Image (cartoon, rainbow, N blue to C red):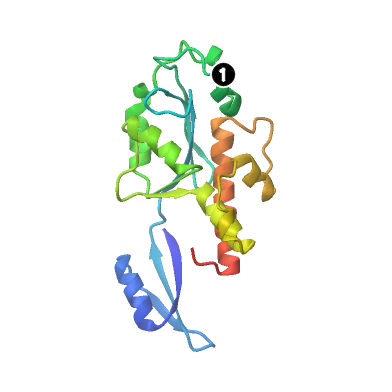
């Protein structure tokens, strides 16, 4: 359980608390506003990264997947053998999942039920470049359900950057490595593996949310 704090009028606090199925404790602040406190089950948040044989989910396949929780704990890590491709040089240079190490491994579909359980049980799924990742998960029947929030950290970072620079035209694709290095993230020895990528994406998302709270950006 986590304690949630809400500031507003008494009616606003009651409304928010009721929407979450909780009963608030309300106190008056010195500035005249009210502060409400109530217990709420912390949402289950995961962050995932995929390694694939290429960009097309119809022709290409998932050869690696890493999932970490909000605390950075690895809840799933798997490498898989493709059924249609033996070489994917261009993609392996990006995700560092080498073909030579994958050929004799089992299929991602052998872990499909386990991966589904993790993803479908989450309240929020954080990914970098959500359109690409979701297409692969949908094609593999492992995409989040309609009630699950999907947060695209690349979009959130680009949006924060455009607000920061007062430039609405600067929204564009930004590599995870660039976003992570911009906020001072330490990659370690393997900056492009699925687990390091998932942890870097999570770190960028946490940093963005901290910036938004600090600067009162309302996205």
Toward the front, the furthest residue is 169
Q: Total marks drawn?
A: 1
| Label 1 packing within 10 angstroms: few (<14), some (14-19), many (20+) | some
The reply to whether residue 210 is visible in this rendering is no
Percent position of residue 202, x then y: 54, 46
Q: In the image, what residue occupies the spot 38% across and 83% down? A: 10
* Picture layout, residue 22 above or below residue 93: below
Does the rendering let one see residue 190?
yes
Q: Is residue 193 left or right of residue 110?
A: right
Name the residue located 33 percent from the left edge and 36 percent from the top edge.
117
> Which image quadrant is residue 3 in?
bottom left
Identify residue for label 1: 89
In the image, residue 138 above or below residue 64: below
- Image quadrant for the N terminus? bottom left
Residue 152 is left or right of residue 111, and the answer is right
The residue tagged with tag 1: helix, strand or loop?
A: helix
Q: Give the image location of residue 54, x and y in percent.
A: 48, 25
The residue at 68%/49% (across/down) is 182
Q: Nearer the viewer, residue 181 or 32?
A: 181
Residue in the foreground of this view, choosing between 177 and 108: 177
Is 170 situated left or right of 28 in this image? right
Tell me residue 177's x, y (percent): 63, 40
Q: Picture coordinates of residue 210 (x, y %)?
A: 58, 60
Could you say which quadrant of the image residue 80 lies in?
A: top left
Residue 188 shown left or right of residue 23 in the figure? right
């Amino acid at each position: 359980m986590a304690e949630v704090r809400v500031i507003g009028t008494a009616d606003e606090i009651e409304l928010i608390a009721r929407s979450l199925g909780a009963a608030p404790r309300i106190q008056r602040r010195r500035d005249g506003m009210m502060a409400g406190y109530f217990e709420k089950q912390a949402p289950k948040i995961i962050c995932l990264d995929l390694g694939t044989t290429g960009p097309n989910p119809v022709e290409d396949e998932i050869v690696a997947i890493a999932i970490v929780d909000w605390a950075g704990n690895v809840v799933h890590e798997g490498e898989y053998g493709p059924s249609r491709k033996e070489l994917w040089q261009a993609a392996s240079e990006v995700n560092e999942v080498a073909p030579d190490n994958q050929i004799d491994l089992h299929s991602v579909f052998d872990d499909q039920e386990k991966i589904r359980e993790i993803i479908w049980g989450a309240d929020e799924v954080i990914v970098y470049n959500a359109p690409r990742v979701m297409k692969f998960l949908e094609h593999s029947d492992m995409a989040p359900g309609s009630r699950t929030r999907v947060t695209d950290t690349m979009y959130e970072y680009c949006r924060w950057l455009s607000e920061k620079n007062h430039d609405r035209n600067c929204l564009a694709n930004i590599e995870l490595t660039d976003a992570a290095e911009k906020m001072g993230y330490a990659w370690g020895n393997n900056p492009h593996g699925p687990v390091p990528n998932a942890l870097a994406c999570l770190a960028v998302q946490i940093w963005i949310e901290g910036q938004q709270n600090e600067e009162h950006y309302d996205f």
